[in-house]
């Protein structure tokens, strides 16, 4: 079963997009959006890769990846767990390409 996360989405003055995830215990954690992935053609949904906000760039962090399903108005949405290996493979490929471009 897909786990749902409530979230708020906003922008800071540096151009970074933030999202707040709320876990099952009601704890809120602020994340920055590293990358969005358009998976509409392949899987009918988009994806978002997140990392904890405020962590120095040189520090290793665990990325969070979710499927992002927008509401009908396109103003909010729902994050869901990624369920298939094919989805993970696509996200990993896009992420690796993104990282290779960042290193150039």
Image (cartoon, rainbow, N blue to C red):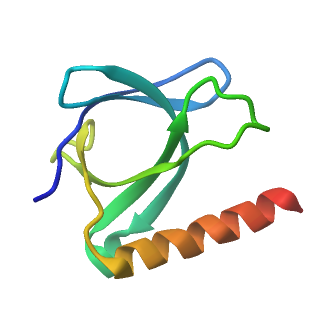
| Image location (x, y in percent) of residue 70 | 24, 48
Q: Residue at x 56, y 27 (%)?
A: 53
**Which residue is most to the left?**
1
Rendering quarter of residue 9: top left
Measured along the vertical axis of the image, is residue 26 above or below residue 83?
Answer: above
Rendering quarter of residue 23: top left
* Left or right of 91, for residue 42: left
Q: Residue at x 47, y 76 (%)?
A: 90
| Image location (x, y in percent) of residue 13 | 63, 17
* Left or right of 88, for residue 21: left
Q: Quadrant of the C terminus?
A: bottom right
Q: Residue at x 48, y 31 (%)?
A: 31
Q: Quadrant of the N terminus?
A: bottom left
Measured along the vertical axis of the image, is residue 28 above or below residue 78?
Answer: above
* Observer-nearest of 93 and 38: 93
* Observer-nearest of 91 and 13: 91
* Observer-nearest of 31 and 41: 31
| Image location (x, y in percent) of residue 54 | 63, 23
Q: Residue at x 36, y 82 (%)?
A: 86
């Amino acid at each position: 079963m897909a786990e749902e996360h409530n979230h708020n989405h906003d922008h800071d003055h540096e151009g970074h997009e933030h999202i707040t995830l709320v876990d099952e215990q009601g704890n809120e954690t602020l994340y920055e959006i590293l990358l969005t992935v358009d998976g509409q053609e392949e899987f009918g949904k988009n994806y978002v890769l997140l990392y904890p906000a405020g962590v120095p760039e040189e520090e290793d962090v665990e990325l969070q990846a979710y499927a992002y399903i927008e509401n009908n108005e396109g103003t909010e949405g729902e994050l869901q767990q990624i369920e298939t290996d094919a989805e993970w493979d696509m996200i990993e490929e896009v992420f690796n390409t993104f990282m290779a471009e960042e290193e150039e």
